[in-house]
Amino acid sequence: MVRFDSTIFLGEKLDWSSQSALRALYTIKFLHESGAKVILVSAWSMKINPKLLAAEAVADILSSVLQLKVAALRCISCNMPLERKDLQKADILLLENLSNYKEEAANCSKFAELLSSEVDFFVNDSFFQSHKILASTVGVARFCYASMAGFSFEESLCQLKKTAKTNKKPYIAIIGGGNLNNKAAALQFLASRCDALVFVGQMSFQIIHALGHSVPPNLVELESQKAALDIVQFAHDKNVLILYPKDFWCVNQHLPKRLDFLPVHGVLDGWLPVDLGPSSLDEINSLVTNSKKIIWIGPVKFWSSSPYTGGTSKLAQMLYKQCQCECEITIVGGTACEAIKNESSSVSSFNMLENASAVWEFLKGQKLPGVMALDRAYPFEIDWNIAYSDPSRPLVVDIGSGNGLFIMGMTRKRKDLNFLGLEINGKLVKRCLDSVHQSGITNGYFIETNATSTFRSIVSSYPGELVLLSIQCPNPDFNKPEHRWRMLQRSLIEAVADLLASKGKVFLQSDVEAVAMRLKEEFLKYGKGKFHVLHDRYDLIINGNTWLKENPFGIHSDWEQHVIGRGAPMYRLMLSNATALE
């Protein structure tokens, strides 16, 4: 299933100069040519293209674009899951318009399951929805064997990451638009990376006001005053230049056809700034000319319905000229990207991100749900000789190692084994590694990672055998349907089944019986028939289910200690893929 971006394919005029369009097209064609049955899903509106209404009309457009037959299917409206026989109707299928269903925006688990029926692999190629938690971008990931990025998604993410790098100096940020209060964290991030912040939109009035200059009261956002002051102070402390417009083209509110340019401190009552003045543009041009890296985000507008675009065009011309001088330039937002297209003979030299919402969230330091929902099985390169004094020893892996009490205790108890903790919380991993170094432990190590998607890559490179895997007290919240991901997925269990030594064991425990039961059921279901439950004569029977009475290792994790301390039960079991040896 491919979640595609409707704004790329379904506009009234498809822009083949856009790298996003070419990569989005390649994602679908690549999958089709590789022999996959492809199910397309998206949301669209008549604002994109007045001809769009029924899925059949969209299927016809996509057929024309792809030069392949796309067949529309009606299953969502009938609340009927897709069946195998439906896949025979065409190699590429299109489901109904997701914008018609409130369950999409609510990330409804049942709706996501309906969307992903008969789906093995999920491919998200709609990057600019990644800041939202949608059923079609986040919810479906938990029902699919694997979730990955399409070519357009991946390229957009790579371009976004470039904005955080300070590899070229001077680096300036040209910032348009309004709502400074909501974007304050992003502005501070830019101030921490850039040498200058250039304000060219409605936000400039908040900055001018924070610098102590007079601004017409109707242009001041009261809720943004403190945030603006903080940004000015932060930039000052970092020695970052703040540039704001020194003059504006203004329109007389009583005589709308009367236009004049006024200095920033001379905007009179009854006059409304509508565009950057000549002095402002000259000052920006001087700064741009000496820059090696630029990001332009947000429109050059001082009120939403302004028809004046002279400043936008001139800014686009400046940037096009500068990109010929080996300057790395990122353009963010529909208005800015459109201006660059109008003023440039080629846009291939620019990094173009046409939807600003996801970018603002990234700059604020927010994790993008659509990105977090995907598998991140990138190859790990680990020097095991640095991690362990003897990397040939058998390996024990603890997934979700937390504060590391179990690993640290076991390293002292079993010097003949190496122990590896995989933990998604970077602060905990750093603390554990510090303890390892301070204690002089040579058979224990910790890695910050999402083990769900990187376990195979990490453990397959280890020189010795994997003899034990433990998953202890996973946070129940990670197993709720509405969450963005869950720890235990089929791909992880299959990796364990493939990599575990022939006499290896899997130790599972939780203080929540439902979680422990699900851990057990999933391992037995997806373990390729290799796992069976080991029983002990001291087993406990609770609610008809059999659990280990004691921790077989005698070393308790931090959460296990907490549970036992309050007198609550632990639900433990041991799995083996062969006759277990003590």
Image: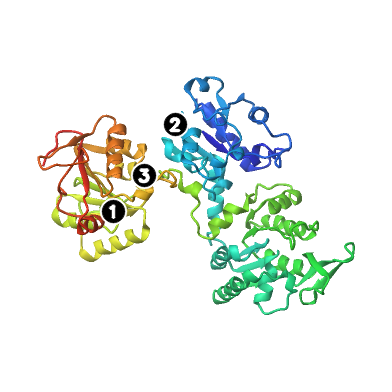
* Relative image position of residue 356 (x, y in whole percent): 62, 53
100 relative to 146 in the view: left or right:
right
Q: CA distance from mark 1 to mark 2?
A: 30 Å
- N-term mark: 2 or 3: 2
Q: Specify which label sits upstream in the sequence, 1 or 2.
A: 2
**Nearer-the-camera pick, 505 or 244:** 505
Amino acid type at circle 3 is Thr
Q: Quadrant of residue 454?
A: top left
Query: Residue 213: x, y in percent?
Result: 70, 79
Q: Which residue is mark 3?
A: 452
Above or below, 190 against 97 in this view is below
Give the answer, above or below, for where 250 lies relative to 504.
below
- Residue drawn at 52 percent across, 19 percent down: 88
Displayed quadrant of residue 258: bottom right
Which of these two is toward me, 251 or 102?
Answer: 102
Side of 212 where 88 appears, left or right: left
Q: Is residue 256 above or below residue 73?
A: below
Q: Residue 23 appears at what percent x and percent y?
A: 59, 39
Residue, disc 2: 120
Q: Is residue 323 above or below residue 2?
A: below
The disc at residue 401 is: 1
